[in-house]
Every structure is written in structure tokens, then in C-alpha cells.
Amino acid sequence: MRHIQPKDLAEQDRFYKVAFFNTLSGIRTPFMVGTQGPVANIGLFNSIVHIGGNPPLLGMVFRPATVPRHTLENILDSGWYTLNSVTESLVEKAHQTSAKYEREVSEFQAVGWEPHYEKDIPAPFVGESPLRMALQFVEKHHIAANDTIFLVGEVKHIWMDEQAIDQSGEILHDVLETTLVSGLDAYYSRKKIGNQPYARP
């Protein structure tokens, strides 16, 4: 095996290092994050993590504010946002939402989607997504080591195909056909391998 330390990549160009470290943590689940600002905003994130189930909390990471972060600004202003899963048929348009559009441009309109709204929830959904969640902002934490923001939200509403929930309560993401992503642009299909029994000593 090759032993690699960050200093070993010093001579590689910036894009090589970005790709290497962005894919180092493995394949993750991307979500389109919907927020409401001057226009309906949708952006692609692959940093959504489970924090706890009672209450149901999810976290997400925002990169340093060296450029405007419309999604973060909208969440802090309204207190609400949505998470929308990405299927293979949605990948191309979902990926396009990661482009740096001006604040007055709606990514929904740019990619040809109509924002979907539910009663009493101010943030927009992607109606074509088979798993949609509405979250309310809970906490914001500054990570000093690299000037990023870790944001915590509580899941308040979920819409999904009932056929994708098995008898144990497990959500079957292969049934939902949700995709996976490595780094910023490498997409993978999902296939369940199986369940292992509860581990005991």
C-alpha cells in the first residue's frame, strides 16, 4: 500500500488536491436543499449527516463565506429549509443547481423545475423528488479550523413513497432509487447488499 501524507501532494495542482480530499471520505448521499429568499432557491449538498433521532436532527456543512452563501443566508433569515433526494433521472438538473447563480436568479427556473410548496412551510420543495423533508433551523456552529459552518436542523415533516418503508421502519433507498455522490461530481447508483444482525460481544 502507498503511504500518503498531505505534504506528499504539495506538487500536485489545486484541482487534483481538491478531488483527492473531497473523495477521501467515500460515497455520500446528495440532497437538493430548498430555501426561500428573494426567489425560490435550490442547491446541491453532499454533506448531510445524521445527528440523532429524538429529536430527529440532521446536520450540514457550509464552506467558508468567501463568496455569497445564498442557502445559508436564506435558512438563517426564514428558519426553514427542505431536503429533496436525488434520483438518477434528476442527477443532471440537480448537479446544475450547484452553479453559482446570482441571488435574483432562481435555480428552479434555470433548470426547468417548478417549486412545490406545502401549507405553512415557507421553503420550496422539488416536486419530482421521491423523498422530501422540511426542516427547521436549530443551531449554527463555526468550525474555526477551516472557517466552515456546521448547521443543525430538526426534521418536522417528511413526504415519501410508503412502499419504501419496510416493516422494521427502515427506509429502502434502493426502492426510492436515490443516488450517491463521491466528491463534487462523481455519481453512483445505489444497490442494497443486505442487513447484518445486531452486533453483540
Image: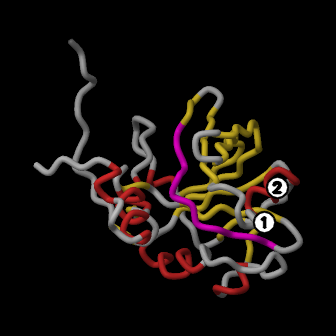
* 176 or 183, nearer to the observer: 183
- Among all residues in the image, which is located at the extreme left? 1
- Residue 82 in the figure: left or right of residue 196: right
| Neighbour tally class for label 1: few under 14, some 14-19, many 20 plus, Cα within 10 Å | few
Residue at numbered disc 1: 117
Main SS category, magenta section:
strand
Q: Which of the 4 image quarters holds residue 71?
A: bottom right
- Residue at 70 percent across and 51 percent down: it is 134
Q: Nearer the viewer, residue 94 or 120?
A: 94
Disc assigned to residue 121:
2
- Residue 137 appears left or right of 177: right
Q: Nearer the viewer, residue 182 or 35?
A: 182
Q: Position of residue 75 (x, y in %)?
A: 79, 53
Image coordinates of residue 107 in percent, x first then y, are: 70, 79
**On-image quarter of the C terminus:** top left
Of the pair 90 and 17, the residue shown nearer to us = 17
Q: Which residue is pictured at 43% across the width and 62% down the height?
A: 178
> Which label number is shown at residue 194?
none
Q: Amino acid at mark 2?
A: Ile
The kind of secondary structure element at disc 1 is: loop
Specify how the rendered protein is coloured.
secondary structure
Spatial CA distance of label 1 from label 2 is 7 Å
Q: Residue at x 65, y 70 (%)?
A: 126
SS class of the residue under badge 2? Answer: loop
Question: What residue range appears in magenta?
Answer: 40-50
Q: Is residue 42 magenta?
A: yes
Compared with 8, 184 (above or below) is below
Asked if labels 2 and 1 touch by Cβ distance under 8 angstroms, the answer is yes
